[in-house]
């Protein structure tokens, strides 16, 4: 079966705080011939792991890299890399994904109120405008 993984399935498979649901989620992911993982689901996964479960960023990166490197997983690898770059620079995973996806849609300048996101992009020589 070719599946689209919902964030709650990813969370259960990774956190395994409910053994029954964890087993079902892990089996669904392992048995699928293709697991489509949207960058949106990864943004939600990052948020849930960091905020609700207080998982350190290094462990979230390990989980995300492990997930997306599975042979049956299909995702936007460049969006994942952008999210991880932001995260590793002290920013938010979702901002990196938003920036990447925006550029693929033809956007040139990232516009934000977020000083941290703007500084990360400036460091990487990307076009950014901080608005007040």
Image (cartoon, rainbow, N blue to C red):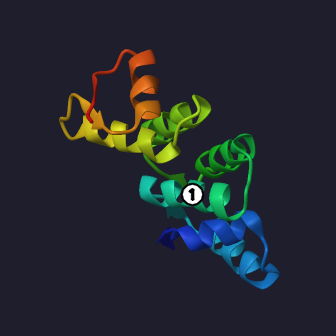
Judge by depth and name the residue closer to the eye, 128 or 78: 128
Q: State the residue at coordinates (67%, 75%).
A: 25
Q: Please provide percent x and percent y for residue 59.
A: 75, 46
- Which quadrant is home to the C terminus? top left
Q: Which quadrant holds residue 103?
A: top left
- In this view, the residue farthest toward the left is 106
User: Could you say where residue 65 lies in the image, as x and y percent from the top left?
Assistant: 64, 43
- Count neighbours of disc 1 (C-alpha within 10 A) and say few if under 14, some if 14 to 19, many if 20 or more: some
From the top left corner, tell me how far across and down residue 17 is, in percent. Answer: 79, 74
Q: Position of residue 129 (x, y in %)?
A: 26, 27
Left or right of 6? Residue 24 is right
> How many numbered markers are drawn?
1
Q: Residue at x 53, y 31 (%)?
A: 85
In this picture, residue 60 sits left or right of residue 32: right
Which secondary structure lies at badge 1? helix
Q: Residue at x 44, y 38 (%)?
A: 96
- Asked if residue 124 can be seen in this view, the reply is no
- Which residue occupies the foreground of this view, 54 or 72? 54
> Compared with residue 104, is residue 53 higher up or lower down, i.e. above or below?
below
Identify whether 113 is placed above or below 72. Answer: above
**Residue with the most extreme bottom position:** 20
* Placement of 22 over or under 43, stated as above or below: below
User: To which residue does mark 1 refer?
Assistant: 47
- Residue at 58% in and 48% down: 68
Q: Is residue 112 visible?
A: yes
From the viewer's perspective, tell me whether residue 114 is left or right of residue 56: left
Q: Which residue is nearer to you in this view: 122 or 6?
A: 122
């Amino acid at each position: 079966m070719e599946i689209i993984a919902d964030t709650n399935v990813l969370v259960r498979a990774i956190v395994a705080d409910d053994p029954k649901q964890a087993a079902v989620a892990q089996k669904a992911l392992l048995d699928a011939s293709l697991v489509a993982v949207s960058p949106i689901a990864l943004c939600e996964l990052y948020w849930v792991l960091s905020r609700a479960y207080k998982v350190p960023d290094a462990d979230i990166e390990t989980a995300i890299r492990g997930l997306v490197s599975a042979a049956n997983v299909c995702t936007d690898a460049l969006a994942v890399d952008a999210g991880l770059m932001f995260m590793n620079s002290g920013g938010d995973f979702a901002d990196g994904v938003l920036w990447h996806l925006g550029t693929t849609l033809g956007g040139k300048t990232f516009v934000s109120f977020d000083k941290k996101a703007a500084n990360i992009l400036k460091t990487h020589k990307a076009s950014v405008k901080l608005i007040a």
